Image: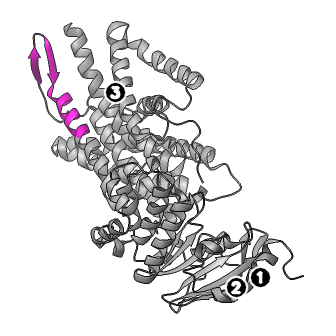
Amino acid sequence: MDTFAQAIISGLVFGAIYAIMTMGLTLVYGCLRTLNMAQGAFGMVGGYAAWVITTDMGAPPIVGLIVGALAAAGVGMLTHFISIRPLVGRKDIDFEMTAYISTLVVAIVFSAAIILMFGARNKAIEPLIDGRLTIFGTVTVAWQQIAVAVVAFLCLGGLSLMLSKSRQGLSIMAVAQQFDAAKLMGVPAGRVYWVTMALAGLLGGIAGVLLAPLYFVSPSAGDLPILKGLTVAVVAGLGSIRGTIYAAFIIGLIETLVATYVGSLWSLPVLFAIIVVFMVVRPYGLFGKPEEERL
Amino acid sequence: MLEVTGLRAGYGAATVLEDVSISVDEGKFVVVTGPNGHGKTTLLRVLSGLLPVNSGEITFLGERLNGRSASSIVGRGLVHIPQGDLLFVDLTVEQNLYMGAYLRDAWKGRRERIRRVYELFPRLEERRTQQARTLSGGERRMLGIGRGLMSNARMLMVDEPALGLAPVLVQEVYATLDKIARSEATVLLVEETLANARDIADYVYLMDTGRIVHQGTMAEFGEDVLASTYLGNSGS
């Protein structure tokens, strides 16, 4: 029973991080209609920025989180101008596929640049907060896990407020849903694109800094998160915002339950099996709509 | 207010509009009519900056609009309410309306604007928290028009507002457009069935195969003019 409770708790914590991470993928897919394969790299860069600021410069972890998120937002914007913007509106290419490849390549370049700058060795990073809270019996929660849950909750809450109320947020939703009408309302599509990529970077960066103390900061730290993010996106149905949150928790729970009861080596194969099953049985995911039309 | 002279435009190599000239004075209700597929919608898409101008001149309130972005044209108060509404279907009614006030100047006054839209369309206020996809056809049309009014519109270009509506609703929509033309903004209407706008149109342009073939006040538009165009023997 205690083991089960423990697995559920850490499943929910991972789910919360995946939700933030995948929300970046979802927003970009909704707005730009391409998969941004650099989403994991945003988290990796965020982790390094946080590591530099906390370990080298001795700043408190919360500052690391903020700096990591902002650095990743900058990298998100940079990715847009390097690898997406030059492709937008070109008639001679398949935008979705080309942008998918170019963002993947940019992610590889970022990893390589990080190796040149900081070396290939893993770096350990301090959690936001130390210690554990005992809930009952032997069930304990690390304060870090609670901090992650709080940060994730604030992020998702803030994001949903932004998307439903603010001028910029609504314009992201509008471009995703009805491109022509958004232009007729005066929305400059080009700006919405880079704002969305910066936001995706911000979310990726936050997820990266939250994951860093659980693993390490390393040049390949973005690889697993993007795989998990893609799994969540496949289960949710690409582009579905509410679906992304549910699916993130489902995947987080499955992952920790498999790791706890079957063995942690099995959690990735199970996730991949889920991708295959969904691709065959329900390619538009649990919450997506079959082949949404776009003008 | 709006002057279009010698406009040529189309999609890529396919020219749809040939030498179109129209003029709309402030406070008037002007209709562009003609059979389906003869360039009326294309004309509005060019005026709102969705399609480029090949040659000719567009001026609005004394400013040249050629080559301007859709966003800057809306900013000048020339607002296009597209055919088929093109709503943001997953957003709520209220969010759709606020999107209509996207530009910074309009955004500041959005709460006051939305009250006026709700006065014009009380049904939208009842449905304000519903997703646009749950609305009926008539309500969608109201939302499309209301969203256009949320901007600082000086002139509304409305494309086929009767399309797909029951006759009762068509009358309602036209009564509202008449009210808008008298109190809110000048209206340029594209309408295939001229009879719908019979009582409110000040001036009518008849468009056929991308050209203006006839123009005049409603009184000058006899049945014979319309019949000849719709029966396909205009110019013969």
Three-letter code, disc 3: Phe
Three-letter code, disc 2: Phe
Q: Which one is in front, B83 or A283?
A: B83
Query: Colour scheme of this structure image?
Result: one colour
Q: CA distance from mark 2 to mark 1?
A: 6 Å
Residue A208 x, y percent position in the rendering: 33, 38
Whether marks 2 and 1 lie on the same chain: yes
Q: Residue at x 71, y 55 (%)?
A: A92
Q: Residues within 10 Å of mark 1 (few under 14, many from 20)?
A: some
* Residue topped by disc 1: B225
- Of the numbered discs in the image, which one, if any, rests on residue A249? 3
Q: Which one is in front, B145 or A192?
A: B145
Q: Residue at x 21, y 40 (%)?
A: A55
Q: CA distance from mark 3 to mark 2?
A: 66 Å
Q: Tell me which chain the residue with mark 1 is part of.
A: B
Q: Secondary structure at mark 2?
A: loop
Q: Is residue A110 above or below residue A235?
A: below
Q: Secondary structure at mark 1?
A: helix
Q: Residues within 10 Å of mark 3 (few under 14, many from 20)?
A: many
* Residue topped by disc 2: B221
Q: Is residue A190 visible?
A: no
